[in-house]
Image: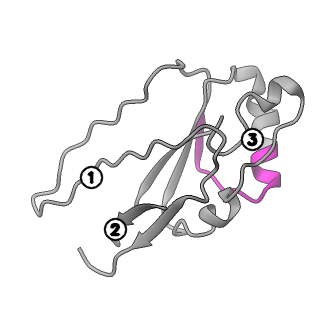
Amino acid sequence: MTPLVLSPLPHTWLIDVDGTVLAHNGYLRGQDVVLPGVSAFWGRIPAHDHIILLSARPETMRQATLSTISAAGLRYDKAIFSLPTGERVLINDNKPSGLATALAVTLDRDGGLGGLDLTITASL
């Protein structure tokens, strides 16, 4: 299990679609499949958090992809398509208290989210 320990503050989630939420390139085979552990993990994301989906899929796949995600009961606030296929870089500042405000988790492709152990702490 990979521990993911977060503060009680509201969070912004940047979540890749292919290979993380849906099977990598499943749409090219005509069968998008939600990966193991995704629904359970999603259910643990606090309701007040903001979820942004990221995808290198072309914009023409937006409606079909988001329909699959919605049909699986996965909520999101925004979705960005047609991104480059290289690294995703997040840069943020730390809070004066020392709280790190940029975290990254890299998972094995198509492994799903079942290996993430999400904990929201009670205090900063």
Quick check: 10 left or right of 16?
A: left
The spot of residue 22 in percent (x, y) is: 72, 42
The spot of residue 30 in percent (x, y) is: 90, 29
Look at the numbered disc 2 and give the secondary structure of its residue: loop
- Asked whether 27 falls inside the magenta stretch, the response is no
Residue at 60% x, 63% y: name it: 41
Quick check: 28 left or right of 4?
A: right
Tell me the number on the disc at residue 66. 3
Question: From the viewer's perspective, is residue 48 above or below residue 123?
Answer: above
Look at the numbered disc 1 and give the secondary structure of its residue: loop
Tell me the number on the disc at residue 101. 1
Residue at 34% x, 68% y: name it: 9
Number of on-image labels: 3
Disc 1 and disc 3 in contact, CB within 8 angstroms: no
Disc 3 and disc 2 in contact, CB within 8 angstroms: no
Quick check: 74 left or right of 68?
A: left
Tell me the number on the disc at residue 93. none
The amino acid beneath tag 3 is: Leu
Q: Which residues are magenta?
A: 68-80
- Asked whether 78 falls inside the magenta stretch, the response is yes
The amino acid beneath tag 1 is: Thr
Residue at 34% x, 76% y: name it: 121
Marks 1 and 3 sit apart, C-alpha to C-alpha, by 28 Å
The amino acid beneath tag 2 is: Leu
Quarter of the image for residue 3 reads bottom left
The spot of residue 112 in percent (x, y) is: 64, 50
Residue at the disc numbered 2:
9
- Nearest to the eye among marks 1 and 3: give it: 1
Which label's residue is closer to the chain start, 2 or 1? Answer: 2
Quarter of the image for residue 75 reads bottom right
Q: Is residue 54 visible?
A: yes
